[in-house]
Image (spheres, rainbow, N blue to C red):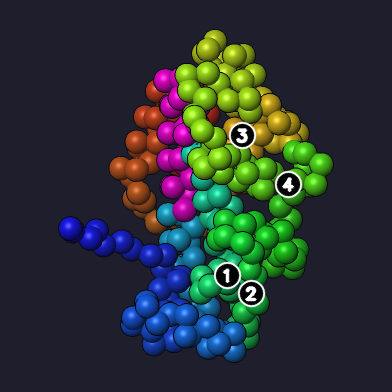
Amino acid sequence: MTVTSFERHAVQRYFENLLGCDDLAQWKSYRDNLRVLTLTPADVTALEPLLLQDALALYTQALQSFSQALTALKRKEFAWPIVKFYYAIFYAMRCELYASSVIAVKNGNIFYMANTAGGTFSSVQEKGSHQTYIKLRKNLPPSVISRDTLLDNEVENGVDVYSWMCSNRERVNYHQKHFPDPEPDAVLQKVYDNYIVTNKLSDLLNLYESNRLYCFDKDHATIAAPYHKLRICRNLLVRRAVPEPFEWVQLQEVKNSLVSAGTDVSITNNLVF
C-alpha cells in the first residue's frame, strides 16, 4: 500500500525544527520544551511570513469547503454540506488566528501565544482537537486578538455558534442511522425551501452581508456563520502583503463552484481575492 506524503503547517514545522525534533513519533516528548520556550526577535521575524502562509492555506480550505457545500445543496445533498459548512468555519477560525499573528502549535494540547519577542506559550486542552480550538478562541484575551463577534450571542441557550455547528456536524456524521437526503435536514429546511429551490442564493448571502444576527438563528446559522467568518478573514488578509500568485488553481475552482451554486459576481468578489 502506498502512503501519500502530506505537508503540515509551516508554523508547526518551525517549532518542531527549532526544538530539534526530526521524528514525529517523538514529538510528545518535547512538550516540556515548548512550555519553557521564549520567543526571540529572530523567531518573531522568521515566524511572521509563516503565519501568513498558514493563514492563506486555511483560508483557501475554508473557501473550498464553503463553495463545495453550496454546490452540493443544489444537488439535493444535505448531510455532507452540514459537515462542509462546519469545516468552513473551523478553518476560517484558525485562519483568523494566524492572520492576527497568534501562534498555535499542536502537541497533545494546543500551545499558543502572540508572535512577540519574549512571549511564552500557554496551553489549552479539551476533549477533541476541534473542541480545543473552540475553547482556545473563547479564551484568547482582547490584548492578543480582536474580539470574536460570533461569540457575542448564542444559537441556543448556553451554546455558542462554533459548538452548535460542531454538534450538528457530529450529529449527521456519526449519530444518525441514515442521512436525511434527499430531504433537507431541519437546520437547512427553510433556507433550502426559500432560497435554494428558488435560485435566490445571492439574495440569501446578501441578507447575511447586511445582518450578522442571522449567525445566531437556527434556521440560518449553518450558512450565515461561516459566510460571516470568511468575510472577516478576507478583510484581515487583504490588509496583509499576500504573495502573488497565491493558490491560483484552487481559488479559480472556488469561483467556478460559487458560480455553479448560483451566486453572482459581487458575492464571489466578497469572498475570493
Question: Of the residues shown, which amino acid type is indicated by label 3?
Answer: Thr
- Name the element at disc 3: helix
Does label 1 or label 3 sit earlier along the sequence? 1
Report the residue marked by disc 1. Answer: 110
Residues rendered magenta in the picture: 58-81
Report the residue marked by disc 4. Answer: 160
Question: Of the residues shown, which amino acid type is indicated by label 1?
Answer: Ile
Does label 2 or label 4 sit earlier along the sequence? 2
Q: Marks 1 and 3, how far apart in space?
A: 26 Å
Percent across and percent down for residue 99 are 55, 59
Name the residue rendered at 82%, 42% in the picture.
Answer: 157
Mark 4–mark 1 CB contact (< 8 Å) = no
Mark 1–mark 2 CB contact (< 8 Å) = yes
Q: Marks 2 and 3, how far apart in space?
A: 29 Å
Dominant secondary-structure state across the stretch colored magenta: helix
Tell me if residue 146 comes above or below residue 176 in the rendering: below
Q: Residues within 10 Å of mark 4 (few under 14, many from 20)?
A: some
Name the residue rendered at 63%, 25% in the picture.
Answer: 186
Q: Marks 1 and 2, how far apart in space?
A: 5 Å
Tell me if residue 270 comes above or below residue 193 in the rendering: below
- Name the element at disc 2: strand
